[in-house]
Image: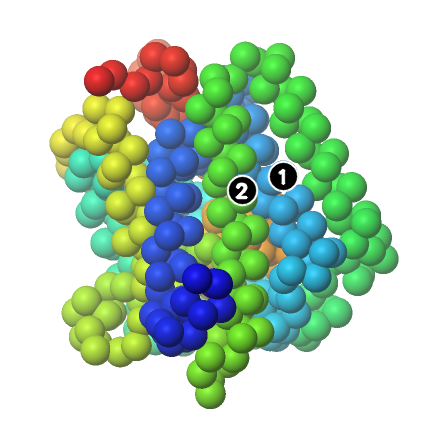
Amino acid sequence: MPLESILESLGQAKALAGGGLIIGFVFGFFAQRSRFCLRSATIEFSRGAPGGKLTVWLFAFATALLSTQALIALGQADVSAARQLAARGSLSGAAIGGALFGIGMILARGCSSRLLVLAAQGNLRSVLSGLVFAVTAQAAWTGVLAPLRELISAWWTVEGGAARDLIAITGIGRGGALLFAAVWLAAAVRWAWHQRVPAWGWAGAIMVGLAIGAAWWFTSYVALLGLDAEAAPVQALSFTGPSAEVLTRVLFAPSKPPTFDLGLVPGVFLGSFLAAALFRELKLEGFAGGASMRRYLVGAVLMGFGGMLAGGCAVGAGLSGAAVFTVTSWVTLSCMWGAAALTDHWVDRRAERLAAQPVAALDQAVPQFSRSFRA
């Protein structure tokens, strides 16, 4: 049965939610296996201690850029209507929000997508942090924090269209964008070979990046079909707005029509849970004490507000937005990296020096493919 016929039979809302569920499942499964995490990549880079996590992130980043730009070049995806490009943006929100998010992901020991993956494994710290993140994001969107978000966002704005498109601004063209992505992919391959990154690391990260391209293609395709009177949003993966939406739907509006985001979040959770269950990594973990809880919750609040202010999280800006070369997403990503590196230096590395022992492990090691599955 052709895909178009299936989508028409489902209707636009269910089709978007179903696509979000499937793409989210793929993302969650391979993010769990590859240990994909911007926070760990940032720490590795800033400390000059290569362990494979930076390489994993680079594979996902380069693959997201290359697959998305290839789909656009081949006429298989039209992202011109995506809010990251078409709508008016905020450079002040991107910079300040990105910095706050970067600080928060160091304190919470994981970005928003990583918290969701860890929560599916049984990490109760991530469950609570994720809930606080979602509540804060909603408060920043329509609640008590909305006036502050709007104030900061208004300081420095940029028009939609060509003014937000780095390809148009730099004049590199689609070919230049593809070459740029290919160079980063080649660098990831080189570092993976040099660091002997396990197969789950690079293969899983490639699938994470392909999930971004798949989301741009699918939502663009549904929008092109015009299954409903209301135009379908063209989007990819993000976790700030979707987390807030899922929380709101569960608490206040369960009868509203489903959306891509409504399928995405549970899809990621289910994919991560299945991966952890198959490879026997389900494990209940809690807080070590009151100080640890305070740290995680402060980090979750900063990520929730920062992600909504910036218009994207480590995935929403760092992969999805960067893949379509929107200037605000690249500003957000740069500020995330800088703020995270400085926070690690001033908070965790200082604490390590005072305690004379490591206090902030990077994350779980990337598993070996041949040894990670036990019957």
User: Is 283 situated above or below 191?
Assistant: below
Q: Residue furthest right?
A: 171
Q: Residue furthest front?
A: 1
Please report whichever mark, 2 or 1, sits nearer to the chain's N-terminal start: 1
Task: Quarter of the image for the C terminus: give it.
Answer: top left
Task: Quarter of the image for the N terminus: give it.
Answer: bottom left
Q: Are marks 2 and 1 in contact (CB under 8 Å)?
A: yes
User: Is 174 situated above or below 227?
Assistant: above
Q: Amino acid at mark 1?
A: Ala
Q: Amino acid at mark 2?
A: Gly
User: Is 308 situated above or below 266?
Assistant: below
Q: Which mark is residue 341?
A: none
Residue shown at 76%/49% (left/top)? 177
Q: Along the line of sight, which residue is nearer the eye, 233 or 309?
A: 233
Q: Which mark is residue 209?
A: 2
Query: Picture coordinates of residue 332 (x, y %)?
Result: 57, 53
Secondary-structure class at tag 1: helix
Residue shown at 47%/25% (left/top)? 201
Residue shown at 41%/36% (left/top)? 30
Res. 320 visible in picture: yes
Q: Along the line of sight, which residue is nearer the eye, 357 or 101?
A: 101
Secondary-structure class at tag 2: helix
What's the CA distance linking mark 2 and mark 1? 7 Å
Query: Picture coordinates of residue 205 (x, y %)?
Result: 50, 33
User: Is 357 situated above or below 117?
Assistant: above
Query: Picture coordinates of residue 23 (x, y %)?
Result: 42, 51
Residue 337: which quarter of the image? top right
> Residue at label 1?
62
- Image position of 138 (left or right of 166): left
